[in-house]
Amino acid sequence: MLFSAAAAVLLALSGCEGVSLEPVPGNTQAAKDPSTSQTELDGLKVVTRAGSMSGYSRDKFPHWRSTGSNCDVRDTVLKRDGRNVKTSGCNVVAGTWTSFYDGKVLNSPDKVDIDHTVPLANAWRSGASKWTTDQREEFANDLDDPQLLAVSASSNRSKGDQDPSTWKPTDTSTWCEYAQDWIAVKAKWKLTVTTKEKVALEDMLGDC
């Protein structure tokens, strides 16, 4: 989910009271060939079971950090993924969002959750427990990769910290992109996958 030049323009405009922003696609990555995603998946370390949750806390993944002018990463994603977005200062106060996971149309920023494609707890179990706090902060606020998504609160709660072997978006049309995004994040951050997780991801790539 690359932070495009268009999104940068939106940030520059966001200091104006009540400005209405035009939509920017949620995932601005160029379409990826499924074979590329498969190659990335094959390059990940596979483990039979996920690591321990011992010592885990969301506080060890500081978020949402400031991105300037009273705007944080959450506001940045809301602006990027929404339509007819309006701000007060740099805070998003209105707009419309289509949840990536279930297709629900959300008409208030209060109804939108910003989800981590690879959940923080999953990252902890697959390698992030060994990172520094600074590294975990970078992961939790990653705007350069397809790691942050605007979704409905209900779909976010349903997903929790599950991987694709136990949870998939109810909107099956997103399965290809979701698998590619999940793989891209794990490849970028050199996180492990379980045997069942890899099988599920390969099945989802079959929808591409």
Image (cartoon, rainbow, N blue to C red):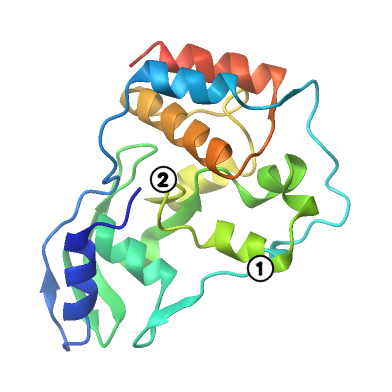
| Quadrant showing the C terminus | top left
> Is the residue under label 2 in contact with that under label 1 (CB below 8 Å)?
no
- Residue under numbered circle 2: 146
Q: What element does badge 1 sit on? A: helix
* Tag shown at residue 45: none
Q: Position of residue 148 (x, y in %)?
A: 44, 52
Q: In this view, does 178 lie above or below 54?
A: above
The one of 160 and 14 positioned closer to us in this rendering:
14
Q: In this view, does 146 lie above or below 92?
A: above
Relative to 3, 22 lies left or right = left
Residue at 40 percent across and 15 percent down: it is: 35
- Residue under numbered circle 1: 134
Q: Where is residue 201 in the image (x, y as percent from the top left)?
A: 53, 20
Residue at 63 percent across and 70 percent down: it is: 62
| Number of callouts | 2
Question: Mark 2 or mark 1, which is nearer the start of the sequence?
Answer: 1
Q: What element does badge 2 sit on? A: loop
The one of 99 and 61 positioned closer to us in this rendering:
61
Residue at 41 percent across and 10 percent down: it is: 206
Disc 1 packing (10 Å; few <14; some 14–19; many ≥20): few
Disc 2 marks which amino acid?
A: Pro
Q: Confirm whether residue 107 shows in the render.
A: no
Disc 1 marks which amino acid?
A: Asp
Residue at 56 percent across and 17 percent down: it is: 200
Disc 2 packing (10 Å; few <14; some 14–19; many ≥20): many
